[in-house]
Image (cartoon, rainbow, N blue to C red):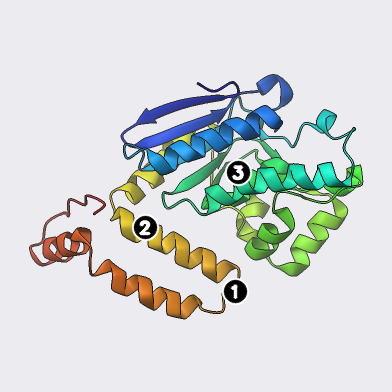
Amino acid sequence: MYQTLLTDLQDGILLITINRPEKMNALNKDVIADLSKVVDDIYANADIKAAIITGAGEKAFVAGADISEFVSLDAAAGSALAEVGQQSVFNKIEQSPKPIIAAVNGFALGGGCELAMSCHFRVASEGAKFGQPEVNLGLIPGYGGTQRLTQLIGKGKSMELMMTGDMIGADDAKSLGLVNHVFPMAELLDKTKDIVKKITMKAPLAIGKVIMCVNDAAVGHPDGFALEIKRFGECFTTEDMVEGTTAFLEKRKPAFKGK
């Protein structure tokens, strides 16, 4: 089904592995096309409750874009490349009503860091490295990196990292708020799955509204508070809200249906 991805659906959680280890899982047109398809499936497939994105092997999550595809591009083609990637993959991941989590298992550089940042949050192995080194190529991030890195870690530090092209390790990434948790490599996927399983036990429609509201807050949406009030009210029309409140009063675990 996919040229560059491995997928495994278990217990409602889709594990997506970018499978170009010989190229450090670098993003190229085929990977972008495959990621677009798999994200569409996440949206459409009711059996998928959440997803985890990781990279094949222990060296790299995604070590950047495939630079060989850049050398023949002019300004219009470069802009088109960035626009297609942002609209078909990165923005779709960020706006997914179902949680998509990055399990960063090595280098997450350039487009790889941008892919991780488009996910709803990030978990990293102890040896993971993050960076936006595009200035070393005479470029800037093109898949939302200037915006999302600034949202996540603030203006000053994002300026420094993008202007120097420096990498930071997992612990520094955690202290800056780029990463939520750091685990030994051998435990990375199991620990990430544990977190995602906890999320999938909650009310799916409420989770989707949390994602929308937090995304609004991250970009400073002027109507963020009003939209929160509206979505809060919408929850009262759902079967899940009735089930959740009833289960609470009856001192039992709720059985949510996403309705």
Q: In which quarter of the image is residue 233?
A: bottom left
Label 2 sits on a secondary structure element that is helix
Image depth: mark 3 or mark 2 in front: 3
Task: Estimate the spatial distance between the alpha carbons at disc 2 and disc 1, rounded to whole Å.
Answer: 20 Å
Determine the residue located farthest toward the left in the rendered image. Answer: 250
Q: Mark 3 points at which residue?
A: 88
Q: Which kind of residue does numbered mark 3 sit on?
A: Ser
Mark 3–mark 2 CB contact (< 8 Å)? no
242 or 43, which lies in front?
43
The picture places residue 116, in percent across and down from the top left corner, at 61, 46
Task: Estimate the spatial distance between the alpha carbons at disc 1 and disc 3, rounded to whole Å.
Answer: 23 Å
What residue is at 21 percent from the left and 58 percent from the top? 240
Q: Which of marks 3 and 2 is nearer the N terminus?
A: 3
Q: Mark 2 points at which residue?
A: 207
Q: In the rendered image, is residue 24 in sight?
A: yes
What residue is at 68 percent from the left and 41 percent from the top? 112
Q: In the rendered image, is residue 110 in sight?
A: no
What residue is at 47 percent from the left and 35 percent from the top? 189
Q: Name the residue under label 1.
A: 220
Label ID, residue 189: none
The picture places residue 245, in percent across and down from the top left corner, at 16, 66
Label 1 sits on a secondary structure element that is loop
Q: Quadrant of residue 50?
A: top left
What residue is at 84 percent from the left and 46 percent from the top? 76
Q: Is residue 102 above or below residue 23?
A: below
Q: Which kind of residue does numbered mark 1 sit on?
A: Gly
Q: Which of marks 1 and 3 is nearer the N terminus?
A: 3
The picture places residue 93, in percent across and down from the top left corner, at 54, 47
